[in-house]
Image (tube, helix red, strand yellow):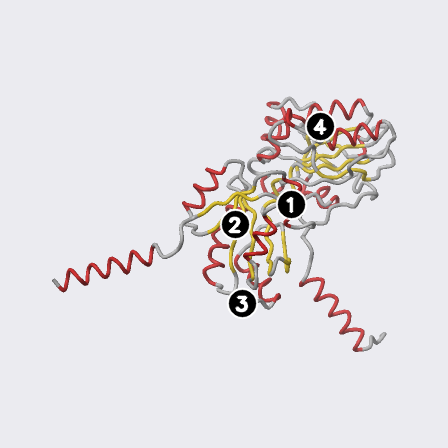
């Protein structure tokens, strides 16, 4: 009997470990809603925002490094914005990568969307920015690596509670 | 040897640090009003012969398009390339399309791949290799497709996107590039001078 109880508790524990995070939510955003969403998320938190697409080779190549960065650094949160043409493709990719929680899917006009995120962004993908309280601390258009972002973070001396 | 006072060195180092720490985006797009750079730089035509931007300048200027073979935004927009070439010709503006993706030159952006892509899509304009993305770097091109339009003085007068709808050419509301070409032809002010679009980053080496 004790063995059964132990096994049951172990099962509950393991289930809890694998299902502790909220499910994936891929929310539509456009140029009118993205700013307020990011301001809310970066309220007293430093957030790394990455605009990506499944058709963008460097985006796919850097994806795992961004996820790793997120797991290694508590002082930073990670938010993905997909610029895919089809939502299903983005959803399938995020599920394959076991991404949980909130993620965004770009809709509406491209130029207004680009300017809503940053007037300095030309529109090339991938695009990444580090923000806090809705303000851009750093941004870049080229492919990231874990090492490169860690260097940028240490330069910015980012700490979160 | 000239001695620089310590406070001055500190100031220089501080400015250097600030510019590194808060460096803007890697590539800076050519500003409006600037002259066409690298007009005599050798570009490679798809038969292997050489050409330059200068060779394609017409009476009212030159349209430079950075493009490639596989970017979904190029594939979506390129059903308008030949129409744009027609409008450019009508307004006495030359047109040349450059492939700057040097990092993919052994693969999807090879000369052979460019040849078959141009044939398949019936390109009516020269599609050339921008070796080591020299022209793309000089113009600060960041993505494909990325448009740079120079007037008869060789000055940049329009930069950005083709129009406001990559998905469907029949649903376009703002014909930015076409309007700019027509304005050049009529020696009128260009209505919208810079626009943005999403696109694939240029694959630099």
In the rendered image, residue A62, in percent from the top left (x then y), is placed at 52, 50
Sort mark 4 into few (<14), some (14-19) or many (20+) by Cα contacts within 10 Å.
some
Is A94 displayed left or right of B76 in the figure?
left
State which tag comes first along the sequence, 1 or 3: 1
Q: Are marks 2 and 3 on the same chain?
A: yes
Labelled pair 1, 3 in contact (Cβ < 8 Å): no
Image quadrant where residue B50 sits: top right
Is A84 displayed left or right of A156 in the figure?
left
Secondary element type, mark 1:
helix
* Quadrant the N terminus of chain B occupies: bottom right
Q: Are marks 2 and 4 on the same chain?
A: no
Query: In 3D space, how far apart are the residues under numbered discs 1 and 2 (Cα atoms)?
Result: 15 Å
Q: Which residue is mark 1?
A: A114
- Mark 2 vs mark 4: in front: 2
State which tag comes first along the sequence, 2 or 3: 2
- Mark 4 vs mark 1: in front: 1
Query: In 3D space, how far apart are the residues under numbered discs 3 and 4 (Cα atoms)?
Result: 53 Å
Image quadrant where residue B104 sits: top right
Labelled pair 3, 4 in contact (Cβ < 8 Å): no
In the rendered image, residue B73, in percent from the top left (x then y), is placed at 60, 35
Residue B126, labelled with which disc?
4
Sort mark 2 into few (<14), some (14-19) or many (20+) by Cα contacts within 10 Å.
many
The one nearer the camera, A9 or A53, is A9
Q: Residue at x 45, y 46 (%)?
A: A94
Q: Report the chain holding disc 3.
A: A
Q: Are marks 4 and 1 on the same chain?
A: no
Query: In 3D space, how far apart are the residues under numbered discs 2 and 3 (Cα atoms)?
Result: 20 Å
Q: Report the chain holding disc 2.
A: A
Q: Which residue is mark 3?
A: A160
Is A99 displayed left or right of B11 in the figure?
left
């Amino acid at each position: 009997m004790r063995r059964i109880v132990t096994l049951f508790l172990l099962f509950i524990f393991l289930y809890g470990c694998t299902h502790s995070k909220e499910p994936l939510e891929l929310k539509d955003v456009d140029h009118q809603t993205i700013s307020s969403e990011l301001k809310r998320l970066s309220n007293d938190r430093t957030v790394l925002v990455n605009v990506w697409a499944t058709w963008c080779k460097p985006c796919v190549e850097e994806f795992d490094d961004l996820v790793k960065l997120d797991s290694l650094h508590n002082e930073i949160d990670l938010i993905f914005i997909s610029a895919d043409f089809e939502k299903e493709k983005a959803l399938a990719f995020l599920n394959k990568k076991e991404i949980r929680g909130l993620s965004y899917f770009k809709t509406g006009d491209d130029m207004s969307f680009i300017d809503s995120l940053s007037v300095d962004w030309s529109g090339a993908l991938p695009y990444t920015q580090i923000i806090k309280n809705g303000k851009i601390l750093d941004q870049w258009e080229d492919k990231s690596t874990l090492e490169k972002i860690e260097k940028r973070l240490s330069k910015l001396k980012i700490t979160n509670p | 040897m000239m001695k620089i006072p310590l406070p001055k060195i500190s100031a220089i180092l501080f400015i250097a640090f600030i510019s590194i720490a808060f460096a803007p985006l890697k590539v800076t797009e050519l500003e409006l009003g600037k002259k066409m750079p690298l007009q005599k730089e050798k570009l490679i035509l798809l038969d292997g012969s050489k050409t330059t931007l200068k060779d394609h300048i017409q009476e009212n200027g030159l349209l430079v398009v950075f493009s490639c073979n596989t970017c979904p935004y190029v594939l979506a927009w390129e059903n308008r390339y030949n129409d744009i070439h027609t409008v450019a010709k009508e307004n006495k503006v030359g047109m040349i399309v450059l492939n700057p993706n040097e990092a993919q030159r052994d693969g999807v952006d090879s000369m052979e791949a460019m040849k078959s892509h141009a044939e398949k899509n019936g390109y009516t304009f020269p599609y050339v290799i921008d070796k080591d993305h020299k022209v793309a770097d000089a113009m600060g091109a960041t993505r494909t497709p990325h448009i740079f339009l120079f007037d008869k003085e060789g000055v940049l007068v329009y930069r950005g996107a083709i129009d406001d709808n990559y998905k469907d050419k029949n649903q376009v509301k703002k014909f930015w590039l076409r309007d700019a070409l027509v304005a050049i032809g009529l020696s009128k002010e260009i209505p919208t001078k810079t626009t943005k679009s999403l696109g694939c980053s240029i694959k630099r080496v």
